[in-house]
Image (spheres, rainbow, N blue to C red):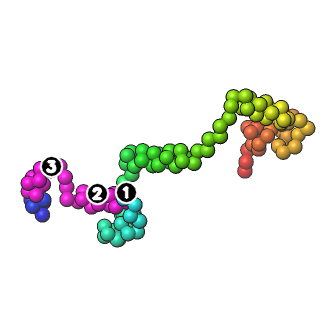
Amino acid sequence: MRQSWNAACKRVGITGKIFHGLRRTAVRNLVRLGVPETVAIRISGHKMRSVFDRYNVTSEEDLQQAANWLNQYFQKKRVTIPVTPRQYEAWVWEKATSQPTGNIGGGGGIRTHGRFHDAGFQDRSIRPL
């Protein structure tokens, strides 16, 4: 088998490829084309999911593609509201003056060692069980 494979590779001008690598390439191509993994497992003839996962290797290119897809998704979802600088300044001023600053009178947090904490376990002396 090996001699036949090497002779065939030489005839088509391919070097450094092994026959078993075709199975890995086929699995990767099926998954990247969007074929459901259960179908790819049946096509590749793997009996166990763990073996299939060894063939379905994630590459840096796969990670970059996923990041690009996320970026495209969020670009489509982006909502732009036209606002003039004057409207923005008025909104910031209204927001800053309409909300109380700090925790006046307590409530909502916990009191430890005479200091007020907005969220639990910020004080190093208090630790969760």
Query: Where residue 68 sits in the image (x, y, percent)?
Result: 45, 45
**Residue 72 located within the stretch drawn in magenta:** no
Predominant SS along the magenta part: helix
Q: Which of marks 3 and 1 is nearer the N terminus?
A: 3
State which quadrant residue 81 falls in. top right
Task: Tell me if mark 2 has few (under 14), some (14-19) or many (20+) residues whose alpha carbon lies within 10 angstroms of its own.
Answer: few
Decide if residue 48 is in sight here.
no
Type of amino acid under label 3: Thr
Q: Which residue is drawn at 38% across and 45% down?
A: 60
Where does label 2 land, which residue?
A: 25
Give the mark toward the camera: 3 or 1: 1
Q: How far apart are marks 3 and 1 (CA)?
A: 25 Å
Residue 125 lies left or right of residue 11; in this view the side is right
Q: How far apart are marks 2 and 1 (CA)?
A: 10 Å
User: In this picture, which residue range is highlighted in magenta?
Assistant: 6-32
Residue 20 lies left or right of residue 105; in this view the side is left
- Mark 3 secondary-structure assignment: loop
Q: Residue at x 32, y 69 (%)?
A: 43
Query: Where residue 23 sits in the image (x, y, percent)?
Result: 27, 61
**Up/down of 20 relative to 89, above or below:** below
Residue 30 lies left or right of residue 76; in this view the side is left
Where does label 3 land, which residue?
A: 15
Q: Distance between the residues labelled 3 and 2?
A: 16 Å
Task: Tell me if mark 1 has few (under 14), some (14-19) or many (20+) residues whose alpha carbon lies within 10 angstroms of its own.
Answer: few
Task: Tell me if mark 3 has few (under 14), some (14-19) or many (20+) residues whose alpha carbon lies within 10 angstroms of its own.
Answer: few
- Mark 2 secondary-structure assignment: helix
Type of amino acid under label 1: Arg
- Mark 1 secondary-structure assignment: helix
Where does label 1 land, which residue?
A: 32
Type of amino acid under label 2: Thr
Q: Which of marks 3 and 2 is nearer the N terminus?
A: 3
- In depth, the one of 51 and 78 nearer the eye is 78
